Image: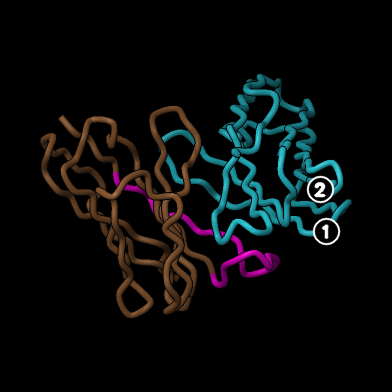
Amino acid sequence: QQPVQSPQAVILREGEDAVINCSSSKALYSVHWYRQKHGEAPVFLMILLKGGEQKGHEKISASFNEKKQQSSLYLTASQLSYSGTYFCGTSRPHTGNQFYFGTGTSLTVIP
Amino acid sequence: GAGVSQSPSNKVTEKGKDVELRCDPISGHTALYWYRQSLGQGLEFLIYFQGNSAPDKSGLPSDRFSAERTGGSVSTLTIQRTQQEDSAVYLCASSLAGGLAGGRGYEQYFGPGTRLTVT
């Protein structure tokens, strides 16, 4: 039931771009994105609600395609501080208040 | 302002003992979540509280796990007769609002977690 993220891991050089995908086999109501640095708690990045919605946060943006039950996180001109594990999180209709986090994507930015 | 706090930060216990983990959410946040994160893994939903409503316990892995939230604020997660597979980091998160609606106010703020080790 957990959303599946791809890729599992990615290594970038500073300044490069990356895309992280989050796919669900079930209908989605909303998608959250969080970043977790090693040994720390997850930190909220953004929420997307509507099909096709795109939001941005600094040089990080995301899209949500309701029909495809997918969301993508776009990181442009990556910085060293972007390193961490990225999780999507979803809520779904008819499942009460359960919140499902994705499998996670480890992102490492090197100089 | 103060963020979400959790105590203890670390807990080592012997198999079969009971443990209590505490979470203090951000003041004014009505929704509170508990998650479990095993080493190198994702976050597993355990339980959700919204105000004074009955909690959503659908994620609790067994009847050894229980949680309560007193006065719509502080929450305690109790694990009875701990097993080695209970070893994990237990994370608490709060949000201004909760449920499906989403949008501003539904973002979750996490505490630093409690690392539980069952020997």
Instruction: Give x and y (percent) for residue B112.
Output: 38, 50
Residue B93 in picture, x, y percent from top left: 45, 58
In the rendering, which numbered label is found on residue A64? 2
Q: How would you rate the neighbour count of disc 1 (Cα within 10 Å): few for under 14, some for 14-19, many for 20 or more?
A: some
The earlier-in-sequence mark between 1 and 2 is 1
Q: Position of residue A45 (x, y in %)?
A: 65, 51
Number of marks in picture = 2
Check the picture and name the quadrant holding the N terminus of chain B.
bottom left
State whether residue B105 is above or below residue A61: below
Give the quarter of the image for residue B83: top left
| B78 lies left or right of B60 | left
Q: Which residue shows up at 66% across the image and 32% down it?
A: A4
Q: Residue, x 84% and y 52% (percent of image)?
A: A54
Residue B18 in picture, x, y percent from top left: 14, 48
The kind of residue on which mark 1 rests is Lys
Which chain is rendered brown in the image? B
- For marks 1 and 2, give the CA distance: 7 Å
Parent chain of label 1 = A
Q: Are marks 1 and 2 in contact (CB under 8 Å)?
A: yes
Q: Which residues are magenta?
A: B96-114
The residue tagged 1 is: A50
Report the front residue among B107 and A90: A90
Q: Is residue B2 left or right of residue A86?
A: left
Q: Is residue B65 magenta?
A: no
Question: Which residue is at 27% across, 62% downward?
Answer: B76
| Label 2 chain ID | A
Secondary element at tag 2:
strand
Give the residue drawn at x 73%, y 32%. A20
Question: Where is residue A13, by image quadrant?
Answer: top right
Q: Which chain is cyan?
A: A
Q: Nearer the viewer, residue A71 or A35?
A: A71
